Structure formats: C-alpha cells, structure tokens
C-alpha cells in the first residue's frame, strides 16, 4: 500500500527512531562545520555527562508511557529524594557509602512510584492528572518540611562518586577531558530496561496494556500489577537520577530539576514512542535524549543564542509529531 | 518448508502438554467432549437461559442461531467460563466441572470474540503464543519469556490456519494487518494451545466471500483434527455452505436442533423468529424513471476511477465488490467523507461538489456508515440525541439552546416510523440490539429528508427479524421516491432489494446486472473475476 511512498520518508515513518538519528547527524554536521570545537573529546564527554539524568528520567517515562500512562511526578520524586537523602546523610551518617545512599534513593523512589500506580489504578483517573497532583504534593512537602536552602556541604562519599573517572584524555589546548564513571549507571539502566521490556512477561504485559487495556485484561493480564510496576520503576530511576544529579553538581538545590519534565517527555516522543501508549523503544528513547542534550548544549558553540534552544526543540517536536502522525493515519 | 516447522513445533511440546494430549482419547471414550444439562441463568430475576441441554462432540461443527437477545451470548459466556449458571451442570469428558475463565482455557475451550481481542501493537507471534506462557505462569509476570518456545508455538498455529510463518510476518504488528488476516491470527491463537472446542462469535461479518472460503477451509482442517467448532452467525447462507449441526435458540430456550443440510433457510428463520419471513425478493415496485443522480467519470487516486452511473428517483442500486475493489471508497466519496478528486456528480439536475460530509448533508444525501459502532453512533449518548444529531441546527431556539421538546417529538416520530424498540429514548444507544442501533442510524439519515440515501452494509451483524424490518423500510423509502444506493457484500441482500447491481473490480465498474435476472453464483463469479 505504501510502496508509492517508498524512499526516505517511508522508511522514517516505519522506523521513527531513524528520524531522530537523522536529526542528530544533521545537527552534528552543521554545528561541527561551524565550530570545530564540537568534535573535541571534552565536548563529547560533556554531552555524555549531561545526558545521564535526562536519560534515566526518559527510560522511566518510556516504561510508564508504554503501559499507557503518563508520569509527571518523576522530577519531584528525584528532587525530594536527592535533597532529603543528601542533607540527612550529611547530618546523621556522613560515613555512609554511596552504594547505600543510591539504594535508599532507589527504594524511596520506588515506593513513591508505587503510590502513583495505586492511585492511578484505584481512582481510575487519568495518570496525567493524578501525577500532576502528586508532583505538587511531593514538591510542596519537600519545600515545607525538608528545606528550601541550597546545600553545599555534601557528604564525601556522594561527592567522590561523581569524581570517579573511566576515561581521561588530554586535549590540544592543554586541559584534560574526563568521562565520569556515573555515565555507566545510564548504560546499565538502559540494558536492564531493554531486558525487562523485551525479554520478560512483564515487559510484554506493559505493551499489551498500553495497546488496549480492556483486551489485555480479558486475556488475563493483571492491570494493577502492570500499572504499579511501571510507576514504581519510573520512581526508582528518578530516585537514582536525583542522587546522580547531586553527585555531578556537588550541591543539592531543592529547586533543581523542577520544570525539566517537558524536555524528558520531548526526548521520549522524539524517540518514536506514541504519546497514546503501547509503543516506544529504549534505543529510540536514548536517541531522543541525545538529540535534546545536543540542542541544549551545543547550539551555543555555533554562536546561536541559548534562547533559541527551545525554539529548535519545539520545531523538531512538531516535525516529528507530523511525521509520526502520518504513520498512524494509514 | 511447512512440514519442517510443524516437526519443530511438535518436538517442542513440554511434558505436561503431551500428557494432556494423551488424555484425550480416554476422554472421548467416556462421552462427548462437552455436555450441558439443564442450564438456567437469570439476570436480576429475568431469565436469560431456561433449561438448555447441549452436547458437543469432538470434531463436529455447530451453528448456534437465534435473534439478538435470544441468549446466545449468555450461553457462550457460560461455556467459556465467564459466567456461571444458576442451575444445571457442565460436563467435560463425562466429568462434572465448575468452569472459570482459566479453567475453560485449560480444558481446551477457546473463544474467538467478535472484536477478535487482539493486542494491536504486539506482533503476530506474541498475539498467537504469548497467552500460553501467561496461562502457564498463572498470571505471574515476573517471568522470562521463553522466546524459542513462543516462536515454535506461533509457527505451528499460524501454519495450521494457513498463514505465513516467516520471521518477518511473525514480527509484524497486528494493527498493520488487514482484517481478514487478523481474523486468522485470532483463530491461530485459539488453537495454539491444544484447543478442543473453538467458539467463533460472528467470525465472518467483516470478511469478503473469498476470505470466508479460506476461513471455511481452516475450520474443515480443525474439524478433521478432532476439534469441535461452534459458530455464532447471522448468515444463514454461510452456515448452510459450511454444514454441520445447528442449534436454534429463542427466548433463552433451545427450540430446535439438527443437521443443517436437512432444513431450508426459511424453516431455520421461522424457528429463530417464530414467524414466517418473506425470503424472496422484497423489490416489487418499478421505479419512476425520473433521473436523480448522475455520476460521471468519478475518481479518487489510489481508490477508484472512471466510475459513471445514473440513478432514478425511487430506484435502488446495489454496489458490491471485494474489499479492495473500491466500493467502500466510492460510497465514502458519494457522501463527502473521502472526497473524489476527479469527475462530476449531479443531483436532481444540479452539479454538486462534495468535499466534506456537511456538503452531502446540505445537498440532501443521507448516509448510514459501514461500521455503526465506530463511524456512526455516539454509543454512550441517548437514543434521542443520536437520532437528531444531524439536524441540531434546526432544533435550537433563538438563544442557541437545543429545544428538548422538539428533539423528543422528532425522535419519537422517527422511532415509531422505523419500529425502533427502546424502553426509553433517553437510554444510551449502546443498550439497544444491533438491529435497533442500525435503525437509529437510518432514522438519523432520514431527519435531513434526503433525496438520495447511501446505505453502507445496513444489515451487518443484524439478526434475521431485524433484517426483514430494515429491508421493508428501504423498500418503503424507495417507494416514496427516494433514490437508494446499497453498498454491501451480502449477495442475497442485494438480490432481494435492488433494481440493478453494480459490481466493482480494481477500482472500476466491471459489470452491471439487472437484479431480477441474475443469481448469486453469477454475481460471485463476477466479483472474483480477475482481469
């Protein structure tokens, strides 16, 4: 039926992430041509570092979206846990190793996510509304009961975790470029997410329910389990992302991360996941994250004012939306 | 290639599965596969089933017949474990059982629902074979998928229904498949796990004749393999050509059963409805002859081209063809849903341009769409609102508020004219039976007082009694001078109602027949003819 549409556009429609890849290549070539700095290790490492938190958020959002939900509360969960755990560790147990802190963040995020999942399931309310609500509640709790001040005396273990290196390269101008070890957390999370989505019954149940929850229920898939799992997983990754954010910035600001949801959602959608659920891939999401990070970080290299970032991202989203909509209309 | 796949499939069965296979001969020795004795079911005190006795033997085909509301769906739900009976017993292999949905599945009772219940975004292989692993894990999801076994099961089942088994097809998302292929995927899922009884709820309502023949071939192979098949269908012709046993239900009771070949269609419909229906031609009146519609070289890129025909006042023209013949697209072009991009249309001597549905409504063209559920009705809205939906502009008072009184008067009049049976016109339209829903749509079309009425599959999924009513309505409308275009793949329906029948192939008009002088076989052959 679509043979007449063969060629590039047909291909892109059938494989949405390729569109994102194409945009990445285009942006890289254009900016690389304008500014040779772009291709330097220091810049590439910077981008890898900058994509970790967005990437973890994106993977969590992908899982919720694939199950037919939407999570708006992950940044709030991340902010609460990062600030709370950092200040608490500093005050009561500065000797606590980072592994334990990360685990606590993961568990805390998971529990908050489970609350989201249970609320969405039992209230039978749209996930968008419920999680906007929990986002406000969590953020207000953080600012009311935990604190509002910038916290810079972060415990050594958390600070040191951000300093581990896996690669150090000397650059032409004498400085050194460092790839921090915590980018591996994103790599591991991506592999685990891919494995869950593609190799377990839970993964397929997530897509089944995102595709059509009535039919999935009739076929014996347990909707409650899937919804709770998806939101819990998103919360878990958000908790970890929050701690990594502290580690890499070496400070904990309770107002951080707020408002970054839209960028994450944009990344996942640019990665080819339908906003109506039931689709999306880990590879596509990572490409979407790379594209967003690219635009947010390198336009400045090409001499484009940073105020244009949102404009470019917006255009990409409209373009992707139009292209992917063609796919659905067939 | 196929035998190789089959061999792999057989070898891959795990021990517990081969045990159930071994148990089968034993079960058939002790009695029929399934037996229902004195099944009663009440909903809020109202009888849905009263004392049904039913025996289903392995390797037999059954047709469950009856009008909407006769208790067929309740009976199916009881057999598939979705409902439990108030009285009576269910025996499987001679042993009395209490069926739950999972219990029915593990006993080998599989149901192919009318909506197919496929997961649109999952692959063919997953749709076919994932349920097996889900049932085995008893619904627990923290399990690794055994992908090799998934593919084995899928390939075996797909081969059994005559679908491709290559990796590419197995990985295709179901939403990308045509409806007929989806139907076969749903059946493949049903037989993927040692089915002994497959229930098919109106499996052919969306299929063309050729696809139905393919399905019949599949059913034959199932039967030969010792699987019992229970059809629920409204199409008497089809049931007769498939053959096997029939069970007629009326008002929750079994009124007749026997061998379908031994009885005529009119006997069967008499048992279903309790009244004698005229199954001969409904069309008697000759039309006026004054021209109404002239379609000249109408075309739409990629759908149909060079379509020219004329329709007189009071004339009924049938348009038929295979699913890809362009008949559906032509119908939609004539009502402005998917506009034509070349050619002209004249209505009552005036050229008209149909770019959007509102153009057609303004020109006086009424339309009953093909799929009443997704294209026609606002399911959760009241019957009344559904009837008046096209003429809201005429019902508003000078403050822009809809005049409920006038809306009610109009709806009541239409409901009476078309014999719509609704307890209350304020009930949601989804609470009505299929035949009544269809009449609501016809009624809505009539509110604009059309000169031309385009009916697209007006009796799909409608029972025999309602069909009769709808045909009489159509004849009456034509008798009053309306031009009617009937787009359908139900041959008897076209033959009984039309003056002329246009057959389309590959986007063009292939042949036109005088309905009075043509029989079903000629029509089918014309439909299938390749150029």
Image: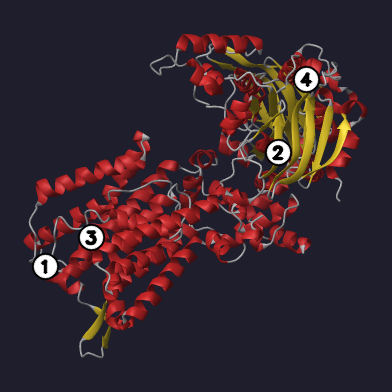
Q: Give the image quarter of residue B13.
A: bottom right
Residue under circle 3?
A242
Instruction: Say what secondary structure mark 3 lies in.
Output: helix
The lab-note entry on whether marks 4 and 2 share a chain reads: yes
Label at residue A155: 1
Q: CA distance from mark 4 to mark 1?
A: 89 Å
Query: At 85% across and 20% down in the image, what residue appears?
Result: B281
Label at residue B314: 4
* Tag nearer the camera, 4 or 2: 2
Does the image show residue B143? no
Residue B58 spot, x, y in % from top left: 77, 37
The answer for which chain carries disc 4 is B
Q: CA distance from mark 4 to mark 3?
A: 74 Å
How dense is the environment of label 4, judged by Cα within 10 Å: few (below 14), some, or many (20 and up)?
many
The answer for which chain carries disc 2 is B
Q: Is residue B64 left or right of residue A33?
A: right
Instruction: Say what secondary structure mark 4 lies in.
Output: loop
| Above or below: residue B97 compared with residue B414 | below
Q: Residue furthest front?
A: B350
Q: Earlier in the sequence, mark 3 or mark 1?
A: 1
How dense is the environment of label 1, judged by Cα within 10 Å: few (below 14), some, or many (20 and up)?
many
How dense is the environment of label 3, judged by Cα within 10 Å: few (below 14), some, or many (20 and up)?
many
The answer for which chain carries disc 3 is A
Is the C-beta separation of discs 4 and 2 under 8 Å?
no
The lab-note entry on whether marks 3 and 2 share a chain reads: no
Q: Give the image quarter of residue B154.
A: bottom right
Q: CA distance from mark 4 to mark 2?
A: 22 Å
């Amino acid at each position: 039926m679509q043979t007449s549409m063969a060629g590039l556009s047909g291909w892109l429609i059938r494989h949405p992430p390729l569109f994102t890849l194409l945009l990445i290549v285009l942006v890289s070539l254009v900016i690389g041509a304008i500014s040779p700095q772009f291709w330097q290790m220091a810049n590439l490492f910077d981008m890898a570092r900058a994509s970790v938190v967005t990437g973890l958020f994106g993977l969590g959002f992908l899982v919720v979206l694939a199950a037919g939900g939407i999570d708006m509360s992950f940044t709030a969960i991340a902010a609460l846990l990062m600030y709370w755990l950092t200040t608490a560790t500093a005050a009561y147990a500065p000797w606590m190793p980072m592994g334990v802190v990360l685990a606590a963040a993961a568990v805390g995020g998971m529990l908050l996510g489970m609350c989201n999942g249970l609320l969405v399931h039992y209230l039978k309310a749209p996930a968008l509304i419920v999680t906007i609500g929990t986002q406000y509640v969590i953020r207000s709790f953080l600012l009311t009961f935990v604190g509002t001040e910038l916290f810079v005396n972060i415990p050594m273990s958390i600070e040191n975790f951000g300093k581990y290196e896996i690669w150090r390269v000397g650059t032409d101008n004498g400085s050194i470029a460092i790839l921090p070890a915590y980018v591996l957390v994103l790599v591991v999370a991506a592999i685990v997410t891919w494995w869950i989505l593609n190799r377990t019954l839970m993964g397929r149940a997530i897509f089944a329910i995102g595709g059509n929850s009535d039919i999935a229920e009739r076929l014996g898939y347990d909707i409650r389990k899937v919804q709770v799992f998806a939101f819990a997983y998103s919360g878990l990754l958000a908790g970890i992302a929050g701690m990594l954010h502290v580690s890499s910035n070496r400070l904990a600001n309770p107002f951080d991360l707020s408002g970054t949801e839209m960028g994450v959602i944009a990344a996942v959608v640019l990665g080819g996941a339908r906003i109506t659920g039931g689709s999306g891939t880990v590879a596509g999401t990572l490409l979407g994250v790379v594209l967003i990070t690219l635009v947010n970080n390198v336009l400045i290299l090409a001499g484009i004012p940073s105020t244009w970032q949102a404009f470019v991202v917006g255009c990409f989203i409209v373009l992707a939306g139009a292209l992917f909509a063609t796919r659905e209309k067939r | 290639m196929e035998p190789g796949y089959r061999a792999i499939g057989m070898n891959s069965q795990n021990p517990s599965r081969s045990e159930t296979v071994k148990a089968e001969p034993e079960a058939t020795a002790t009695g029929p596969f399934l037996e229902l004795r004195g099944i009663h079911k009440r909903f809020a005190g109202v009888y849905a089933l009263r004392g049904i006795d039913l025996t289903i033997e392995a390797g037999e085909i059954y047709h469950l017949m009856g009008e909407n509301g006769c208790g067929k769906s309740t009976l199916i739900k009881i057999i598939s474990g979705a409902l439990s009976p108030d009285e009576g017993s269910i025996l499987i292999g001679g042993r009395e059982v209490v069926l739950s949905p999972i219990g029915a599945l593990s006993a080998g009772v599989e149901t192919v629902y009318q909506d197919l219940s496929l997961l649109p975004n999952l692959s063919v292989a997953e749709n076919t074979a994932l349920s097996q692993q889900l049932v085995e894990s008893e619904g627990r999801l923290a399990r690794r998928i055994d992908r090799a076994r998934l593919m084995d099961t899928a390939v075996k089942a797909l081969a059994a229904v005559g679908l491709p088994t290559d990796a590419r097809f197995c990985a295709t998302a179901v939403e990308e498949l045509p409806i007929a292929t989806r139907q076969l995927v749903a059946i493949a899922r049903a037989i993927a796990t040692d089915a002994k009884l497959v229930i098919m709820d109106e499996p052919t309502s969306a299929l063309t004749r050729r696809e139905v023949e393919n399905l019949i071939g599949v059913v034959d192979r199932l039967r030969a393999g010792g699987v019992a098949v229970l059809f629920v269908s409204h199409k008497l012709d089809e049931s007769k050509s498939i053959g096997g046993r029939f069970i007629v239900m009326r008002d929750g009771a079994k009124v007749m059963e026997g061998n379908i070949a031994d009885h005529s269609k009119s006997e069967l419909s008499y048992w279903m409805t309790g009244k004698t229906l005229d199954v001969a031609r409904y069309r008697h009146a000759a039309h006026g002859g004054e021209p109404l519609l002239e379609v000249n070289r109408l075309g739409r890129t990629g759908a149909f081209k060079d379509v020219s025909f004329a329709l007189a006042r009071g004339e009924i023209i049938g348009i038929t063809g295979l699913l890809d013949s362009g008949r559906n697209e032509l119908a939609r072009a004539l009502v402005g849903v998917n506009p034509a991009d070349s050619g002209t249309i004249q209505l009552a001597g005036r050229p008209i341009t149909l770019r959007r549905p509102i153009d057609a409504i303004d020109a006086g063209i009424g339309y009953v769409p093909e799929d009443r559920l997704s294209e026609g009705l606002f399911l959760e809205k009241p019957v009344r609102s559904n009837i008046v939906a096209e003429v809201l502009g005429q019902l508003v008072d000078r403050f822009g508020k809809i005049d409920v009184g006038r809306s009610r008067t109009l709806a009541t009049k239409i409901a009476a004219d078309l014999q719509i049976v609704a307890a209350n016109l304020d009930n949601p339209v989804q609470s009505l039976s299929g035949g009544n829903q269809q009449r609501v749509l016809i009624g809505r079309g009539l509110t604009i007082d059309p000169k031309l009425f385009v009916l697209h599959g007006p009796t799909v999924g409608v029972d025999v009694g309602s069909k009769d009513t709808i045909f009489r309505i159509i004849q009456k409308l034509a008798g009053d001078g309306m031009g009617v275009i009937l787009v359908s793949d139900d041959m008897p329906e076209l033959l009984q109602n039309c003056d002329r029948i246009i057959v389309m192939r590959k986007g063009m008009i292939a042949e036109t027949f005088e309905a009075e002088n043509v029989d079903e076989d000629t029509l089918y052959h014309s439909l299938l003819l390749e150029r």
